[in-house]
Image (tube, grey):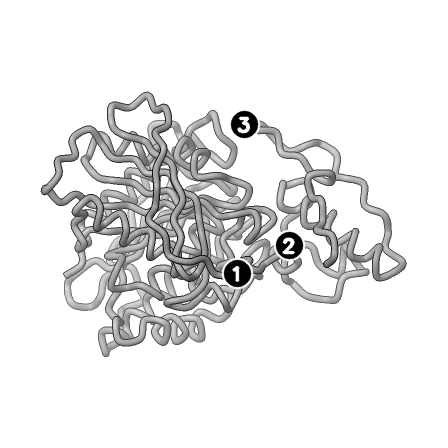
Amino acid sequence: MKKPYDVSRVGVLRRGGSPAAEPPHCPKPVSRRRRRTALSCLVAAMAFGVLPAAASAATLPWLPYSPQPWWTYLPGMGSGGAQPPTTPTSTPTSSSLPGSLTTGNYSNGSGTLAYQLYVPSTYKAGTAMPLVVALHGCTETADVFRQLTRWDQLAQQKGFIVLFPQQSSSNNYLSCWNFFQTADMSRGAGEPAVIAGMTQSVQQRYGVDQTRTYVAGLSAGGAMSSVMAATYPDLYAAAGIGSGCEYAATATCAGYQSADPTQAARSAYTAMGSHSRAMPVIVFEGDKDTTVPPINAQQAVQQWQLTDGLALGSSVPTAPTSTSNATAPGGQTYTVSHYGDGRGHELIQSWLVHGMAHAWSGGSSSESYADPAGPDETGAMYAFFVQHPMS
């Protein structure tokens, strides 16, 4: 058994601050072992924003020529083996909100994941509430993502439950969801099966409204939201993709662009299987994002338009039904494009935040990957969700 890379020694991100000013020292590889070491350095440096997201043979000639970014080179993608089904257990944690914030672990035959769960104080047993499943980005935890997005605060205000699954570092060294791995892109297997099982467990425990269960995420979590929407369209009524990628994007969406959206659309429709239906999607992106460039937001819209057209049995108009420009209270300008299904219903929203890099728009300034000056991404996503229950 080869010893895992120790990425903690080659890159540090200051919590609530900027990455270290100097990149980690990476020796020029002249042997297979040294090449592996350099790849480890590259992974850490790019993941933490020390190096540009789109490295290629032009800048790193010792790599095989490819536009593929750091996600391609992540080690340790295995799930570590299946776990027997268990009943999820929760331990209360502190929260300044009047509702209940608990942590626990969920296991089924496809693996085990930790989670946080926020239930608002207005919850009453026997009264169905909506549920939002919120997926964090790389290097984040469920708790960091909760604080960054303030999904729990909105849940208390609006009256819904929020589930924050947490990726295991044993599945991915940088805690990225493996949205680009074949083993984690299908129904009934890998990470989608664990996230779906966790979602269903919460539905059963709290009598959640199964027509109003949604999934949203940031970055790799946004890409995983696409995966969940394609693999479990009977479970999630709508999806939110924050600075993420289309289904079957491949790892090239980090620092470059996703795979051909036409092919991805067919793959998503195939993944839906007998549960295929038009999936409402809201997409957020910053036009200064170099980690997941804006082209990926455009491709996500295209992919879901084509997938939804296949599910409906007729093409969906590609042109927006309306486009508007506005300025957020924090001063950031943005453009919202609305897309219809050709039958008089809104199907997709695309928000482009001008001047925003790789971040959660309107996120808490106390966390990394936040753009507090932008429009409220959390609020916009939930407003879209409530307009799109599963019919």
Q: Quadrant of the N terminus?
A: bottom right
- Give the residue displayed 53% in from the left and 45% down from the top: 138
Residue that extends furthest to the left in the rendered view of this protein = 126
The residue beneath circle 2 is 70
Residue 276 lies, in percent from the top left, at: 26, 72
Coordinates of residue 369 in the picture (x, y in percent)? 50, 36
**Kind of residue indicated by mark 2:** Trp
In this view, the residue in front, 359 or 138, is: 138
Q: Which mark is residue 293?
A: none
Up the image or down, 192 lies above or below 105; here it is below
Q: Amino acid at mark 1?
A: Gly
The residue sitting at the top extreme is 96
Residue of label 3: 16
Q: Tell me which corner region of the image, top left, top right, bottom left or bottom right, holds residue 206.
A: top left
**Horizontal and vertical percent for residue 15?**
57, 29
Instruction: Please identify the residue farthest to the bottom as the structure is shown.
Output: 313
Q: Are marks 3 and 2 in contact (CB under 8 Å)?
A: no
**Which residue is tagged 1?**
81
| Mark found first going from the N terminus, 3 or 2 | 3
For label 1, the SS is loop
| For residue 308, side relative to residue 64 (left or right) | left
The amino acid beneath tag 3 is Gly
Number of numbered discs on residues: 3
Mark 2 surroundings: few (<14), some (14-19) or many (≥20) residues within 10 A? many
Q: Residue at x 55, y 53 (%)?
A: 171
